[in-house]
Image: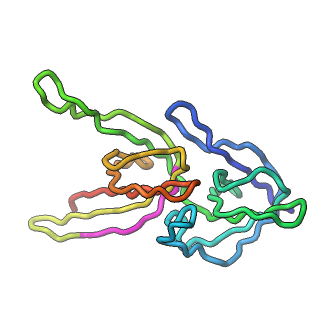
Amino acid sequence: MNERIEILALDQREREFSWKRIDRTWAQVEMSGERNLYEGDNTNPFASAGAGAELTRFLLRRRELTPHHAIRWQGRHYLITGVALCGRNHLEAVGVCVQSAACIARRPTAGKDSLKRPLGGTEEIARFPAAVAEERREYRPQSPMARAEAVYTLTTPKAVQLREGDLVEVDGIGYHLSAVHLRGEYQNEYEIRREWDL
């Protein structure tokens, strides 16, 4: 065991979520050469976030560790896809390196003013980390200009609960949340999209 890793747990303070280091330990790290090929598999804790990414195996001393945790190694963020006992004193965590982003979720304000007009504002409901994976980009030629659309999948810790219609800002860029996928007991996936004129 010759690599220093950090074990992270989700910290929640009111409406703000963040990964907090709970331990630093030594581990043996092996890039397995296998790929996370679980795109579309509802049994995988995070089907889209690390689809196609190389799996990494972390062998460390036995401790409390589940897919609710994450690992930071060499400045990179790893979501844990599985944990298995390895002998009496060790365990093996399998993780996939993901691109982590800072997100802010806002919900349109419900209600009407005295003239029965929609209020039209938004309220911030959460700040949270998420793994971002690009699903697709589309370009549609139209007259006199073209439209572009980008669709991403956000994989969040289970504690982050959003709903369709919410507005999500990812690293400063605004998106509309168009689909919610509640996957297993560890993470949720949200499909977000943005359109713009070219």
Q: Dividing the picture into quarters, in which one does residue 191 lie?
A: bottom left
The quadrant of the picture occupied by the N terminus is bottom right
Identify the residue shown where x is 62% and y is 65%.
96
Task: Name, please, the residue furthest toward the right.
Answer: 88
Horizontal and vertical percent for residue 69? 66, 51
Identify the residue shown where x is 52% and y is 36%.
16
Horizontal and vertical percent for residue 36? 58, 73
Horizontal and vertical percent for residue 27? 81, 60
- Above or below, 30 relative to 23: below
Question: In the picture provided, is 155 more to the left or to the right than 19?
Answer: left
Specify the principal SS of the magenta part: strand
Q: Dividing the picture into quarters, in which one does residue 166 lie?
A: top left
Task: Name, please, the residue furthest toward the bottom.
Answer: 33
Residue placed most toward the observer, 24 or 155: 155
Q: Which residues are magenta?
A: 130-139
Identify the residue shown where x is 49% and y is 34%.
15
The quadrant of the picture occupied by the C terminus is bottom left
- Above or below, 93 relative to 24: below
Question: In the picture provided, is 40 more to the left or to the right than 76?
Answer: left
Identify the residue shown where x is 66% and y is 42%.
20
Question: In the picture provided, is 131 more to the left or to the right than 28?
Answer: left
Horizontal and vertical percent for residue 144? 9, 65
Task: Name, please, the residue furthest toward the top.
Answer: 114
